Image: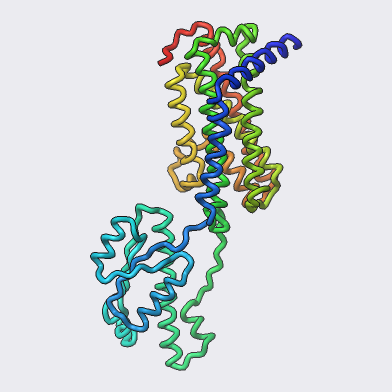
Amino acid sequence: MRKIWQNISAVVGRELRIIRRRPIYLLGSIAVMVFVAIFFLTFFRDGLPHDLPIGIVDNDHSSQSRNFIQQLDATQLGEVVMFDTFEDARLAMQSGKVTGICVIPANFYADISAQRRPTMTYYLNGLYFVGGALAYKDLLQMIVLTNGAVQRQVLRMKGVNEGAIMGRIQPIAIDTHQIGNVYTNYGYYLTNLMLPAFLEIVVIIVLIYSLGMELKYKTSRHLLQKANGSIIDALLGKLIVYTVLFSVIGLGVVMLLYFVMHFPIAGSIWNMFLAILLLVVASEGVAIFIIGLVPVPRLALSIGALYSILGISMAGFTLPIEAMSPWIQGLSVIFPLRHYYLFYTQEVIFGAGFAGWYKEVIHLLLFTFLPIFVMPRLKNAYEKQNFPID
C-alpha cells in the first residue's frame, strides 16, 4: 500500500509540474469557466426579453385600433413600431428589425360595431425562437383581451350584469403552474444548466488533452515509469490533480448561482454540491473511456467535443426528451448531463430530496466504471506508442 501511495504521489508531483509549465490547462479550465459565467450571467441578466419590436400596420385609424396599439405598447414584452404599408413591415421583419407584424384591417371598428367579425392578421419571425414565441404570446394575449373588451361592451349595452358578463367572456378561469421554467426567467433556467454543461465540456476536453499529450509528446513511458508500470496508479495520480481542480470550479459554480446570485432553489445547496461533484467524476470517467478507446489525441478530442455538445441537446432542458422517439430517450442515458439535469429538477425545482434523485446518483456513479474497460488498451498504447498522433 505504501508503494502505491509513493507511485501516486510521484505522478501527482509530475502532473503539477506539467500544469505549472503549460498554462493551457488552467486557461482551458478556470479561464474558460470564468468567461462562460460572465457571459451567461450578463446575457441573461434581465431574465426575460422585453420591449420586443412588433410592427403594426393600422389600416383603420379608429379609436378602437389606437386603443389596441396603446395597450400592446404598454405591455412589458412588446414595443410597437408603426408602418404605413404591409410591404414596409414585411421588409423590416425579413431584415430582423421586428419580431412580428400585426395588421389591423380597414373598417375594423365599424365591423365590430356591426358584429361582422373583422379578421386581424399577424405574422411571426420563426428564425428567432424565443423572440418569435414571446411576440406570439404578446399579440395573442392582446387580441384575446380586445375580443373580450368588445364582448363586454356589447353585453353591457344589452343590460347584462358584470358577473354574468365575465361568466360569458371567460367561463373557465385558467390557473397556470409552469413545471420547468417556473419563474418564466431564462436567466434562472438556462444559466442553472449551461454552466454545469460547459463544466462537463471542460472536464472531458482538458482530461482527454492531458492524457493524449502523453502520446503526442511520447512521454507516456515516463509517466508509467513514475507509476512503476501501473496504469491504475498513473491514472489515479492524474485524476487526483484534475478532480481537485474541476471540483473547486464546480463548487464555485454552485456557490455563484445559489449563494452569490441568489438563484431560487427549493431544496438544499449541499445536495447541489453533491450533484456537481458527481458530474465531475462521471465526466472524467467518460474522458478516460474515450481516450482509451481511441488513443489518438486529435481523434479523441474531436469525439469528446462532439459527445459533449450532443449531451447538451440530449439533456432535456432545451428539447423535451420525453416527447421524442423511445430509442432517443434510451440514448439520452449515456450522457452524464442528462442525469445531472434530472437531479437538478428534483432538487432545485421540486425540492424532493434524496427520494427524488437517488437514482441519478447511481447512474452518475456508473460512468466512473467506464475506464475499467479500456485500461488494458490505454496501457498498451502508452507502452508501445504505436498509434498515429497527427
Q: Position of residue 197 (x, y in %)?
A: 53, 39
Judged left or right of residue 64, residue 91 is left
Could you say where residue 340 lies in the image, as x and y percent from the top left? 59, 40
Quadrant of the rendered structure where residue 203 is?
top right
Q: Residue at x 53, y 39 (%)?
A: 35
Q: Which residue is drawn at 37% across and 65% down?
A: 54
Where's the C terminus, which quadrant? Answer: top left
Q: Can residue 109 be seen in this view?
A: yes
In the visual, does 60 lie left or right of 12? left
**Quarter residue 121 falls in:** bottom left
- Residue 350 visible in this rendered orientation of the protein: no
Q: Going by the picture, which residue comes out furthest to the right?
A: 2
Residue 346 vertical placement versus 243 (above, below): below
Nearer to me, 272 or 223: 223
Please give the name of the residue rendered at 47% of the width and 81% of the height, measured from the top-left corner: 168
Position above or below: 59 against 373: below
Q: How many labels does the image show?
A: 0
Q: Where is residue 314 in the image (x, y as percent from the top left)?
A: 48, 40
Q: Is residue 65 above or below residue 297?
A: below
Left or right relative to 201: residue 93: left
- Colouring mode (rainbow / by chain / secondary structure / one colour): rainbow
* Coordinates of residue 34 in the picture (x, y in percent): 57, 39
Q: Which residue is drawn at 57% across and 23% down?
A: 370
Q: In which quarter of the image is the N terminus?
A: top right
Q: Quadrant of residue 68?
A: bottom left
